[in-house]
Image: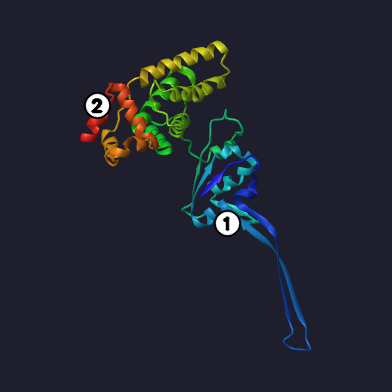
Amino acid sequence: MLVHGDDEMGTADLVGKDSGFKRSYIRDEYVHTVLKIEEEVKHVWVGRALTEACQKGLTVVYDEFTRSRPEANNVLLSVLEERVLPLRGENIPVHANFRIIFTSNPGDYAGVHGVQDALLDRMVTIHLSGFDQDSEIAITQERSGLPLAEVERIIALVRAFGDAGLKASSASARPAILISRILRVRSGHAYAEDPVFIQTCRDVLLSLARRTGASLQEDQQNEETLLRLIRENCSVPLPIEQPALKAAIHDLEPDNLMAELGEDKEVQELLLRKIREKGLAGKLLTELLKG
């Protein structure tokens, strides 16, 4: 069960609250000479995530709990320590299988409140570092759909930029994912000669470096560092998947080949790139059609 912390959240948003009234009315005329009327009005209780989890033994993930004000989380003290949930004047026993996982950003993030010591004393705090390189590659490829070879280059570039002291990434894979998604949308490639790739890296990575209030001179130095890292990590031409290219071409009729290539931009792009790299011109097309 997922709960998101929020500055406007109160205790009622965790455990529940009364929401309106329920009215019951009974009119009994079974004996025609006797009229019996009963009327009852009750509060309607609407439970929230913490109440349900405590009663059913569910696991709660309280995401960014430090965005909630400390007083909103006070109800968790008795839940974690005495294993009871104070609710409407009663103490509800907490199910033995109930678990809660708190996540938070560092304290220097905007919109983050301090955590009361009493709550920290009732939990085990685990500090997480950034992803390892293989995990970051897998996450970025899954989120962007870019080929593995290009994702590996982007991850290497972002990490090198961060190692240069320019704060491109801490524990976040977002810069690499953002670059990969833009390349996917704009049909760019992680190659030092691709203007879309170079501009995308400038827009994403330099904007991160500027957050520290870099001067104009520092900004120019950062850009020079970025361009150098792009040349170092992305100068080798990307490998082309020849089987896929051959299959795409062999599915075409020779008479309609050029017309079809004009419509299929992916095949056209692969073909032209290979021609530029090897200087094969018409020989490449001939060989692929033979194969």
Q: Position of residue 44 (x, y in %)?
A: 67, 61
Q: Nearer the viewer, residue 175 or 112?
A: 175
Disc sitting over residue 285 in the figure: none
Which of discs 1 and 2 lies nearer the camera? The answer is 2
Decide: is 94 above or below 193: below
The residue tagged 2 is 283
Give me the C-alpha separation between circle 1 and circle 2.
Answer: 80 Å
Name the side, left or right, on which 26 lies relative to 241. Answer: right
Where is residue 216, by image quadrant? top right
The residue tagged 1 is 92
Residue type pointed to by label 2: Lys
Where is residue 51, by image quadrant? bottom right
Decide: is 21 above or below 219: below
Q: Position of residue 20 (x, y in %)?
A: 70, 59
In primary-sequence order, the first of circles 1 and 2 is 1
Tell me which residue sits at (47%, 54%) in the image.
96
| Residue 147 showing in the rendered view | no
Q: What SS does tag 2 mark?
A: helix
